[in-house]
Image (cartoon, grey):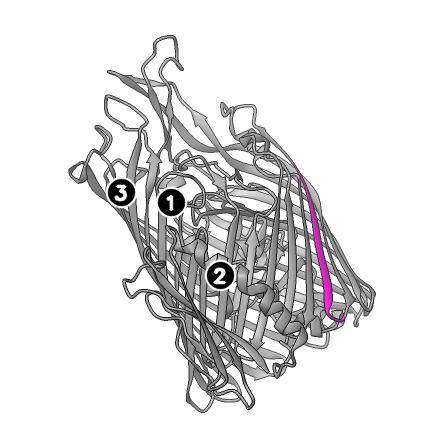
Amino acid sequence: MTELVVHLYKSTSGKLFPRAYFFCQLKISLVFRKNVRHYQPVFRGFMYDWCLCERGSMYLPFFIHHQNAQKAYLMLFVFCLPLLAAKSALSETDTKRTTDFTTYSLEELMDMELVSASKKSQTAHESASAVYVITQEDIRRSGAVNLPEVLRMAPGIVVERADPGAFAVTSRGFLGKYANKLLVMIDGRSIYSPSFSGVLWTYNDILLENIERIEVIRGPGATLWGANAVNGVINIITKNAKDMQGGLGVATVSNQEGYDGLRYGVKLKENMYLTAYGKYMHFGNVINDKFDDRRQKNMGARLDWDMTDRDKLFVSAQSYDSDDSGRTTHPLVLPPLVNPEVNSSATIRGGNFLSRWDHTFSPTSDMSLKIYYSSQKTRAERATGYRPARDSSDLRDDVSRESAADIDFQHSFALGGSNSIVWGCGSRYSRLYKQDRNFYFTLEHETERQKLYNFFVQDDLVLAPERLHLILGSKFEYNAYTQLEVQPSIRLLYTPSQNQTFWAAVSRATRTPSFLEEKGRILSGYINPGSLYPLSPPGTVELQSSNNIESEDLIAYELGHRMQLTPRLSLDTALFYNVYNRLRSLEPSAPQLHPGYFIVPVQADNNMKGRTYGAEVAANWQVLPQWRLQGTYSYLRMNLKPEKKSRDTTSEYDEDLSPENTFTLRSLYSITPSLECDISLYFMDEIKRLNNPSHTDLTLRLGWKPCKNLMVEGIGSNLIDNKYKAFRDDVYARGDNKVRRIFYCRMTVEF
């Protein structure tokens, strides 16, 4: 057997790529006996080394000198790729075929167990919701390097790149970098920020190889999950520590950005397993040509213990550390009022802890008790309110801390022969501390606190065995801002045959106000001189909170149909019609004139309403045993209107922030058991309000598995539209917002 081994020696300076000479060695080995393998872990600043044989070796040394060593790595990979493909196609291999979804039938995929749609185990075929499952093999073969990019393959989910490392993600409209109508969880732990009720995707990134599956529910999920599960729920479920034993190393090199990861799992004792991991990400000059850099480190561990046949304990912990620096615009609040570009930097550190105890009383009754705590500290340096920063003496620290603690209990049981009941209760405590420095935002008090209490119950009533189910339930939540919130739902599930399911639902969901909407003040923009009246001075807009703001309200009507047309073809369709009331509006007041500048106060209120409707289709076609096609299409129409008493003239145009049409097509083809070729096509319609034209993203992935424990991948993204306009709804967005073409070389080794 002939093998091609690549040795890449890196400097020990700690940098990702050396700027001087580096040595690359191609080792072509003829092996006449079983390989003796040893691996050195993949780390930044250390040697990459895979030694797969002991004799019959021929060394082909050469040197490369390049100003940008990243390109040299890519040149090396492109040079090696034809050899790798030829070797894989022509030579005999001792590798076993990778276990992936292409080895399963569509019936088996439909029978995959889910927990997010009803807070109990059920299959997609039994779910009365618009649900889509992204498996680990979907993730691996997508070519994605972060969570938001993975979510693009789900129908109804819109993902747009914003700043380096920042994304705008939403479901069924209201796209924004700080979108607040989508509940996102990791292993049932909510990761939305109480500051603005949105998700900071960058700081909640985890090692993609640790994910077992992602359950995506479009539409309201508030009956089970509570406030903020308005337009959808995303639950990221990680693998059991028992399934992550041994070691795994991942290294990615790219012309723009990259990440490294390391994971190792051990068995502590019988039925007790521990896994720890680390991940380093570097978001470089991806969006614009100006200085912009973000580096992040994530570390975490997971413990799974089957204490008895009836009791299981799950404990996880994670920490992250992010350094962010670049150029941003910031309105200065004291004369001379200008809107300069200033250097800024921020350090974000945080962590979380989650523990869950599961107990089984009987085959039809079980309970779960979950406790978690999360904390984050942000320290930012920006210009003072008097002038742009000229040196470090003009910078001040801007410190904020937020934390949350949550306890949640759940119990499910069967009542009689036709009722399956799940109920639970919980409490959440949130705290936000903000040092008053007159930067992005301030609070009425230095520290704000919020307590939330909830109770829910849901009954799955069997009207006709194996045919017709009626699902009734409601969530009752109490918070200090809006008092009691009731969020009921009624769902009907009809299964005329094993291959077909119809479902319908009517639901209510609410979004409670965030800390900033209730107790905050935000500088939101700069007004050019002469805008107020001829020769008027410059000004700024100040968003002010309101103690009278209420929860946003949604009544959703949904219809769905799932059908397996043939043993090789399945189709999933969902229709929805949403009615929104009390949407947030921005009510301006009379300008306040000051010597040399003016301020326009804008207060948050609930004077907007709207309607949205649309359709989502997902198809799965097993063309050949080794070839699968997956496609999705989503259509969305929005109509937002202010109430008659509203003075808001801008919020209704938020309907033009979301694309009307999105389309994805994925081809996953296994050329041989060790060589894969995957193509992903993503189409995004125009975003009218930002004047962003429609664009198409083509991602190509080639994967080669030379032996059981090694995977080498070449990935190209944005291959059609190079430098298309990125999403920008943030007045502090940086640079020219261009998304570039990116190439990756990723190596994954198990040991």
Q: Given the image, on which type of amino acid does mark 3 rest?
A: His
Q: Secondary structure at mark 1?
A: helix
Left or right of 139, for residue 525: left
| Residue 628 colored in magenta in the image | yes
Q: Amino acid at mark 2?
A: Leu
Q: Residue type at mark 1: give it.
A: Phe
The answer to which quarter of the image holds residue 373 is bottom left
Q: Can you tell which quarter of the image residue 481 is in?
A: top left
Foreground pick, 733 / 503: 733
Could you tell me residue 673's position as x and y percent? 66, 75
* Residue sitting at the far left: 393
Do the CB atoms of the residues marked 2 and 3 lie less than 8 Å apart? no
Considering the image in quadrants, where does the N terminus appear? bottom right
- Closer to us: 96 or 451: 96
Which label belongs to residue 515? 1
Kind of element beneath mark 2: helix
Q: Is residue 261 left or right of residue 662?
A: left
**Magenta stretch: dominant secondary structure:** strand
How packed mark 2 is, by other alpha carbons closer than 10 Å (few <14, some 14-19, many 20 or more), is some
Which residue is painted at 59% across and 56% down in the image?
221
Number of residues whose C-alpha sits closer than 10 Å to that of mark 1, classed few (under 14), some (14–19) or many (20 or more): many
The residues colored magenta run 625-637
Find disc 2 in the rendering and name its residue: 76
Tell which tag, 2 or 3, sits nearer the viewer: 2
What residue is pinned by disc 3?
445
Residue 443 screen position, x and y as percent: 30, 40
Between discs 2 and 3, the one toward the N terminus: 2
Counting residues from the N terminus, which is met first, the one under dot 2 or under dot 1? Answer: 2
Residue 539 or residue 45, whichever sits in front? 45
